[in-house]
Amino acid sequence: MQAGKLEPEVAFLNASLIPDVFSLLAAAHKTHIAKSRDSLTTRTLHSELVYNYSGSSTYIVAARFNASPDEMKAVEKLIKGKEIELEELEGRTNQAQMQKHYKISGLGVGISSLADVITCRIAGRDAL
């Protein structure tokens, strides 16, 4: 674990905080750029994706474990939800939770869509 190499690597994100695919792609793009420049903030690509999608530069929750197939099945049972198409994300978001997580006031949403505000925060966080 100290080496930062886990097999298989996975990243879990709360789907209710993802307003559309574009914001997720923005976080993935930042992750890819950081990897290509050898400047990851975290140890792995998957934790970097979680970091880049988070609402704060100091907020990251990661659980690392070397799970057996039986343990993976147990983890699957903990996840309350079902697999959906990416296009369905927008209809499953929690606007109040997203505004709280990203510290977005009503004014920000009045100017643009919540998805646009979140994507801009993700893309511009390092520039501020």
Image: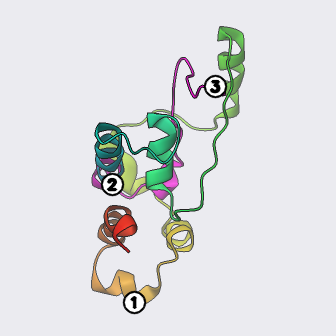
Indicate the secondary structure of the residue bearing disc 1: helix
Residue at 52% in and 19% down: 8
Q: Within 10 Å of the Cα at label 3, are there few (<14), some (14-19), or many (20+) other Cα atoms?
A: few
- In the image, 80 versus 100, the foreground residue is 100
Indicate the secondary structure of the residue bearing disc 3: helix
Q: How far, Cα to Cα, is label 1 from label 3?
A: 39 Å
Q: Within 10 Å of the Cα at label 2, are there few (<14), some (14-19), or many (20+) other Cα atoms?
A: many
- In the image, 57 versus 78, the foreground residue is 57
Q: Which residue is mark 3?
A: 76
Estimate the x, y position of residue 33 in percent, counting from the top left: 28, 45
Q: How far, Cα to Cα, is label 2 from label 3?
A: 24 Å
Which of the two discs, 1 and 3, labels the residue nearer the N terminus?
3
Estimate the x, y position of residue 98 in percent, counting from the top left: 50, 66
Estimate the x, y position of residue 85 in percent, counting from the top left: 35, 37
Residue 121: tell me if it is visible: no
Q: Are marks 2 and 1 in contact (CB under 8 Å)?
A: no
Dominant secondary structure of the residues highlighted in magenta in the image: loop
Which of the two discs, 2 and 3, labels the residue nearer the N terminus?
2
Q: Quadrant of the C terminus?
A: bottom left
Q: Which residue is mark 2?
A: 20
Residue at 36% in and 56% down: 90
Which residues, given as a range, are shown in magenta? 1-25
In this picture, is 88 found above or below 96? Answer: above
Amino acid under label 2? Asp
Q: Which residue is mark 1?
A: 107
